Image: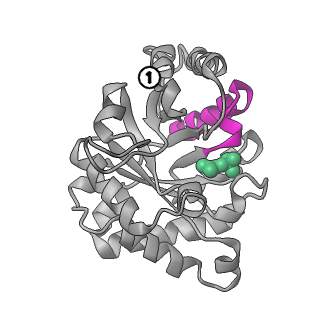
């Protein structure tokens, strides 16, 4: 069985005090529990080190929300893979829809970043997802295929061990409109089929595919219960222990069933 991952994407939210309090609160909420799922939090860059300290030895791991593909040099405003690792990151989110659509990142850049992360042993959560008009035009699968092909070009089967896919329909992000469990399952099954044809069925069966887009305590159990949904990438609801705690709980419950 694939180990579930419950990931929190804090985006450009919190401040130092609130971020460290949230991280410490999450650590307390899961303390004493057997951590049978991976729990990841991705705070803004300036708070990574403090959040890493605040989660302590709770088992929660920390990731960046983005990185650059060069190792160092004249790239004003960018952060390298090595820098993320230096402050204790195990993961990085790549290709998030806000990076694609607000910051205009293309598949080529996302691919370079993915390869840079895994070359250095940093886990990559590669996000893919269609816009509402693409879904309505019946192009969801074609868009997912293009993002998978572009993002994973030149990534070997062996390197895929460090990759997690996150399916995030853009129309469901931050809108309160969640994909139905059936819509999520259908897209996840398609992504797994893509992985099987690009690599092998065995590899496809081993890769985690997270769902993201308005995940909250009230819908987490049903979404996570779908056969091809192996976790959640949570935005808004990851910003409080009251909301993120029960989503982790849902994962823990399912991991034992
Ligand atoms: P949301 O964001 O949970 O607020 O919809 C998800 C994401 O963007 O990762």
Residue 38 lies, with reference to residue 179, above or below; the image says above
Q: Which residue is mark 1?
A: 59
Give the residue displayed 54% in from the left and 40% down from the top: 7
Residue 117 lies, with reference to residue 144, above or below; the image says above
Neighbours of disc 1 within 10 Å: few (<14), some (14-19), many (20+): some
Is 127 in front, or is 216?
127
The image quadrant where one finds the C terminus is top right
Q: Is residue 257 visible?
A: no
Residue 183 lies, with reference to residue 67, above or below; the image says below
Could you say where residue 127 lies in the image, as x and y percent from the top left? 49, 57
Give the residue displayed 68% in from the left and 61% down from the top: 181
Residue 52 lies, with reference to residue 217, above or below; the image says above
Say whether residue 41 is left or right of residue 164. Answer: right
Magenta stretch secondary structure, dominant: helix
Residue 170 sits in quarter: bottom right
Q: Residue placed farthest to the bottom in the image?
A: 137
Q: Is residue 228 visible?
A: yes
- Secondary structure beneath disc 1? loop
Could you say where residue 98 lies in the image, as x and y percent from the top left? 59, 56
User: For residue 180: magenta?
Assistant: no
Could you say where residue 200 lies in the image, as x and y percent from the top left? 27, 69
Give the residue displayed 24% in from the left and 67% down from the top: 154
Could you say where residue 196 lies in the image, as x and y percent from the top left? 34, 71
Residue 153 sits in quarter: bottom left
Say whether residue 203 is left or right of residue 231. Answer: left
Identify the magenta region. Answer: 234-257
User: For residue 250: magenta?
Assistant: yes
Asked whether mark 1 and ligand 1 are closer than 8 Å, the reply comes as: no
């Amino acid at each position: 069985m694939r180990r579930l991952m419950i990931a929190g994407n804090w985006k450009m939210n919190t401040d130092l005090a609130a971020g460290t309090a949230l991280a410490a609160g999450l650590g307390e909420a899961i303390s004493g529990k057997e951590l049978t799922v991976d729990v990841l939090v991705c705070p803004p860059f300036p708070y990574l080190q403090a959040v890493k300290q605040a989660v302590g030895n709770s088992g929660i791991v920390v990731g960046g929300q983005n990185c650059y593909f060069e190792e160092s040099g004249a790239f004003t405003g960018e952060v390298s893979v090595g820098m993320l690792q230096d402050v204790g990151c195990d993961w990085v989110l790549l290709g998030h829809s806000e990076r694609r659509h607000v910051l205009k990142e293309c598949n080529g850049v996302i691919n370079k970043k993915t390869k840079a992360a895994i070359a250095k042993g940093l886990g990559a959560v590669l996000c893919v997802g269609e816009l509402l008009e693409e879904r309505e035009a019946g192009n969801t699968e074609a868009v997912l295929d293009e993002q998978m092909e572009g993002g994973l070009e030149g990534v070997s089967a062996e390197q895929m061990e460090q990759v997690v896919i996150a399916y995030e329909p853009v129309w469901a992000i931050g809108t309160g409109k969640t994909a139905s469990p059936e819509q999520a399952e259908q897209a996840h099954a398609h992504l797994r089929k893509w992985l099987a044809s690009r690599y092998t069925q065995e590899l496809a069966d081993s890769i985690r595919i997270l769902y993201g887009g308005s995940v909250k305590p009230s819908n987490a159990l049903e979404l996570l219960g779908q056969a091809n949904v192996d976790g959640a990438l949570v935005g808004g609801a990851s910003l409080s222990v009251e909301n993120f705690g029960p989503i982790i709980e849902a994962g823990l419950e399912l991991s034992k069933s």
